[in-house]
Amino acid sequence: MEQLIEFVSNHPLLSGGFVAVLALLVWSELMRKVQGLVELTPAQAVSWMNDPRVVIVDVSAAVDYNKGHLLNARNIAMSRLKEPDAEVQKLKDSRLLMVCKTGQTALQAAACMKKMGATEVAVLKGGMGQWISDQYPVTRK
């Protein structure tokens, strides 16, 4: 314990940075739990995708979407979720699977949909990167 105190006193910026990063990590995880966001692994997402009520929303940039996306996914820009139009408003009554390149933007998109009133929203954990890494199929159509 004495060494820890000495380290902290000799390296206040490094110690402060560590505490700040740790606090942000804890805060972001708590916010996910509070918002009720569900993250699905690719294997879990497949069972969701087999439900005919599910709408897959890919919030990736059009360039990334065109490189490969989930079958039947709709490419909807994040800006449309932040200021929803009539088509986006209709989505809130569906089961939604939000997808992006890495999973981070999809979390923001899911939070927007929850705020709009959507009740069943899930995010593909790891995004398309994880989906492709796990060797699941993609389409370019």
Image (spheres, helix red, strand yellow):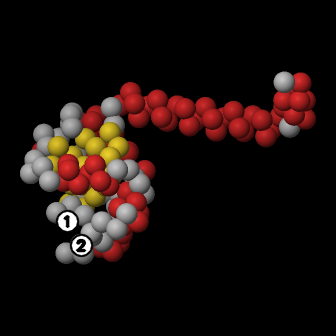
Residue 20 image offset from top left, x and y in percent? 66, 35
Above or below residue 6? Residue 58 is below
Residue 107 image offset from top left, x and y in percent? 37, 45
Q: Quadrant of the N terminus?
A: top right
Residue 106 image offset from top left, x and y in percent? 35, 50
Q: Amino acid at mark 2?
A: Thr
Disc 2 from disc 1: Cα separation: 6 Å
Q: Which residue is mark 1?
A: 71
Residue 3 image offset from top left, x and y in percent? 89, 30
Residue for point 72% across, 39% down? 17
Q: Which residue is mark 2?
A: 139
- The answer to which of 100 and 52 lies nearer the viewer is 52
- Secondary-structure class at tag 1: loop
Whether label 2 touches label 1, CB < 8 Å: yes
**66 relative position to 73: left or right:** right
* Identity of the residue furthest to the left in this view: 52
The quadrant in which residue 23 appears is: top right
**3 relative position to 42: left or right:** right
Above or below residue 19? Residue 130 is below
- Secondary-structure class at tag 2: loop
Q: Which mark is residue 49?
A: none
* Badge 2: residue crowd in 10 Å (few <14, some 14–19, many ≥20): few
The reply to whether residue 128 is in sight is no
Residue for point 75% across, 34% down? 16
